[in-house]
Amino acid sequence: MRILIVDDSRQSKFYLENRIKEREEYKIIAMIEDAANAELYCIKHSVDMILMDVCTANNSSGIEAAGRIRKNYPNVKVIIITSMPEHSFIKKARAYDCNGFWYKEYDEIDILEVMDKVAEGNYVYPKSAPEVEIGCTKSSEFSPREFQIVRLLAGGMSRQEIADELGISSRTVRFYIDELKAKTGHDDTMKMVADFVEKKLIINGLK
């Protein structure tokens, strides 16, 4: 199988290259850093499988690029790879019909095993994002709505702006923020949001 690696991390590319070289059935045909160029590469070359990082050079989204490739080149299998435990990545990868998902630093399954299963026609995903501690609470204990509130706070929105965005009252937004602070043990809202961002559970600029 002809493999394209899309990753802007030198360390990650080095690891993937050496692991894949162990197997004769896989051949790396190129390694590029910008996901925006991955679809163009598929136009000009024959590709069987792509290992696509989520955040690539020039702020290009690997997941969005993967979605376009899966739509226009359904025979090209795409495995999303990332070192970030951001909670929404798995859901987005599934929505774009990506064939697999692998965490570089957290996943117990080996990348070659993921590639083998995907090559056989399977969809391979972890059960959940890696668990990370935010204050005194684990990331698995936050609801999708709570993550949504934190994401909008990280984007610089006020309580009223968040309320308008979500179609709820400002009072309800305040309730969620108070609950988040109580869960995490943070007294300051911005310090709490910074903790989510620092642990890469929320990626700034990602909707």
Image (spheres, rainbow, N blue to C red):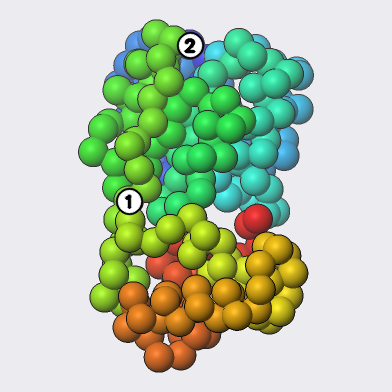
Question: On the image, numbered disc 1 is attached to which residue?
Answer: 130
Across and down, in percent, residue 102 comes to: 39, 36
State yes or no: discs 2 and 1 in contact (Cβ < 8 Å).
no
Of the pair 131 and 157, the residue shown nearer to us:
157
Of the pair 55 and 8, the residue shown nearer to us:
55
The answer to whether residue 84 shows anywhere in this view is no
Across and down, in percent, residue 41 comes to: 71, 25
Q: Amino acid at mark 1?
A: Pro
| Quarter where residue 36 is shown | top right
Residue at the image position 68 percent from the left and 16 percent from the top: 73
Residue at the image position 37 percent from the left and 47 percent from the top: 129
| Quarter where residue 92 is shown | top right
Residue 34's place in the image compared with 94, above or below, is: below
Residue 165's place in the image compared with 86, above or below, is: below
Q: Callout 2: helix, strand or loop?
A: loop
Residue at the image position 60 percent from the left and 48 percent from the top: 56
Question: On the image, numbered disc 2 is attached to which residue?
Answer: 1
Q: Quadrant of the C terminus?
A: bottom right
User: Which residue is at the far bottom?
Assistant: 187
Of the pair 68 and 97, the residue shown nearer to us:
97
Position of 150 with respect to 82 (left or right) is right
Number of residues whose C-alpha sits closer than 10 Å to that of mark 1, classed few (under 14), some (14–19) or many (20 or more): some
Position of 118 with respect to 152 (left or right) is left
Residue 197's place in the image compared with 97, above or below, is: below
Q: Callout 1: helix, strand or loop?
A: loop
Across and down, in percent, residue 55 comes to: 57, 50
Residue 207's place in the image compared with 161, above or below, is: above
Of the pair 164 and 187, the residue shown nearer to us:
164
Using the numbered discs, state the Cα–Cα distance from disc 2 to disc 1 in whole angstroms: 30 Å
Across and down, in percent, residue 6 comes to: 57, 36
